[in-house]
Every structure is written in structure tokens, then in C-alpha cells.
Amino acid sequence: MPNSIIAHPLTGDLYFGRVPEYRTKRDIIPEGLIILLQGRHIGPNRGFGARHIWSEHSKEMLADGFETEEQVSHYVARIVCAGTPLFFEASSWRSTRIMAVRSLAGTAILELRQRRTETVWSVVTAFSANKKHGIQIGTVL
């Protein structure tokens, strides 16, 4: 199931941290828990979650010692952890996304989603590059 949540590999929690609220002149970045979904890979640069990350970035993961799709959550946990800086460039009509950039570990792209009655930030993808874009809006809590 693409929308099933993958637990944090170290804590067993269903989240990897929390994005704090941040306000710009034009946008409000809402607070929300960070989740990793099983996801779906549709094609190059199209998809979300663990399946998409493995399909797009398995070579990078293998180079870092993550050998299977089941280890995607470990890869994400290395990037998205307490203190990881969060960056916001701009929202589009389609989605609001932020970057979690941990200089030695890589980058994760988080997308704002509504799940039932709660606001969450879903991990769309994660990769080894660590170039920052936009303004820093806080850190993962």
C-alpha cells in the first residue's frame, strides 16, 4: 500500500521528527510530524516515499552501505533527525515543499500533506547532495 507509514527504524515511532511552524510575508509553514510512506515510483523524478527513493537513489545508498529497499528508512533517519536544518524556497499552486539538509548525510525533500485530520510532512525523496536552497526556517524537532 503506497500510503502506509514506515516506522522510524531506531525508535519504532511512526514519525521521524517534527517541522516547527514558520511564517513568511506570504506563506505559513505549518507545524507537522515528518512521516515516510511506502510510496510509489512512477518514473524518473516522479513518485514519492521509500519505493521512489530506492528506485531513484539506490546507487547512492549502496555507496553509503544501505543495501536493500528495506533500509531506506535508515537512510532517511540519518538525514532527518533532531537539529537538521530546514529550508523553504517558495510554494507552488500544487504543493508546499521544504528541504531538510544535513551536510554530511544528504537532503530530504518534505511535502505538506493532510492525512485525515492532521497536517504532516511526507518524505518525497532523499539523496546524497547537500546544496541548500531558500531561507532557513528552523530545524527538525
Image (cartoon, helix red, strand yellow):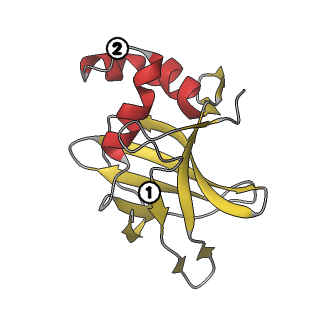
* Residue under the point 37% across and 41% down: 77
Residue furthest out toward the left: 104
> Residue type at mark 1?
Gly
Horizontal placement of 10 versus 41: left or right?
left
Rendered view: 75 above or below 68 = below
Q: Which residue is the site of mark 2?
A: 67
Quarter location, residue 96: bottom right
- Front-lying residue, 73 or 85: 73
Instruction: Provide residue 126's location: percent of width, then percent of height.
Output: 44, 37
Q: Give the x, y percent position of residue 112.
A: 64, 57
Which residue is under mark 1? 17
Real-space CA distance between mark 1 and mark 2, rounded to the nearest whole angstrom? 24 Å
Q: Residue at x 41, y 14 (%)?
A: 68
Circle 1 Cα neighbour tier, 10 Å, few/some/many (<14 / 14–19 / ≥20): many
What element does badge 2 sit on? loop
Q: Quadrant of residue 91?
A: bottom right
* Nearer the observer, 38 or 94: 38
Could you say whether the residue bearing mark 1 is in a helix, strand or loop?
strand
The relative height of residue 131 versus residue 141 in the rendered view (above or below) is: above
Position of the C terminus, as image quadrant, is bottom left
Q: Earlier in the sequence, mark 1 or mark 2?
A: 1
Give the answer, above or below, for where 71 lies relative to 25: above
